[in-house]
Image (cartoon, grey):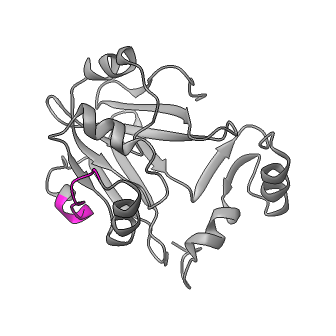
Amino acid sequence: MKLSQSEWTCIDDEVGVWARSYAFNDSGATSNCFVVRIAEDELAIISPPCHLSAADFEALEQHGRVTAMVAPNGFHNVGLPEFHRRYPAAVFHASAKAAARIAKRCPELVAAQPLEALQSRLPDHVKIFDGEQLSTPDLFARVESPRGTIWYSNDVLVNLAELPSAFVLRWLFKLTRSAPGFRVNRLVLKFLRPKAGFAAW
């Protein structure tokens, strides 16, 4: 499913799953955030996007209140201050390594709670967890729906329709066979430093 640059895309309305593509720097490079309903009117958001309008927030709030913000790793942090200002009561969660890096870049955030603390708040059909056998954590989510299983992969798995337009990124993605199509992102794995057993996992 192609994600819109300007609106929330409904992945599954029954269990409550939405996504949004957003540009995180001036190069036009994009990332995806993932929103899942974790209680009747509560939402968890992974990799909160940046530069949202009031209308963007209001559209999201039609589905519930953001009560949990999750950083998938230490690098996806540009939208966290914006979401913290909008939802000051939302609990911020991250792995220990990610939290240490984000604390230096986003000092206005309340100290991150561990991902384990989030697990107790999740319904049985939702799992949010770090990928196994990675020296630098990177997050996955799995949501069981009557329509099937919905997966969110932050950086390890990518599905780019085409190579990036920026020359250096285009060359790197092509060289590492990380795009186009549904691929293991071998470029980012050089930074995440997988351990033995990761490929099998």
Residue 56 in percent (x, y) is at 39, 19
- Quarter of the image for residue 81 reads top left
- Quarter of the image for residue 98 reads bottom left
User: Camera-side residue: 178 or 27?
Assistant: 27
Residue 12 in percent (x, y) is at 38, 28
> Magenta segment: does it hold 52?
no
Residue 38 in percent (x, y) is at 21, 40
Residue at image position (33%, 62%) is 103
User: Camera-side residue: 23 or 26?
Assistant: 26
Q: Tally the marks.
A: 0
Q: Give the range drawn in magenta.
A: 108-117
Q: Give the farthest residue toward the top.
A: 55
Residue at image position (57%, 25%) is 5
Residue 84 in percent (x, y) is at 27, 40
Residue at image position (42%, 59%) is 139
* Main secondary structure of the magenta stretch: loop
Residue at image position (69%, 65%) is 186
User: Camera-side residue: 179 or 55?
Assistant: 55
Where 97 falls versus 11 (above or below)? below
116 left or right of 102? left
Where 192 falls versus 89 (above or below)? below
Where 79 falls versus 10 (above or below)? below
Q: In which quarter of the image is the N terminus?
A: top right
> Magenta segment: does it hold 116?
yes
88 left or right of 184? left
155 left or right of 9? right
- Quarter of the image for residue 144 reads top left
User: Camera-side residue: 53 or 64?
Assistant: 53
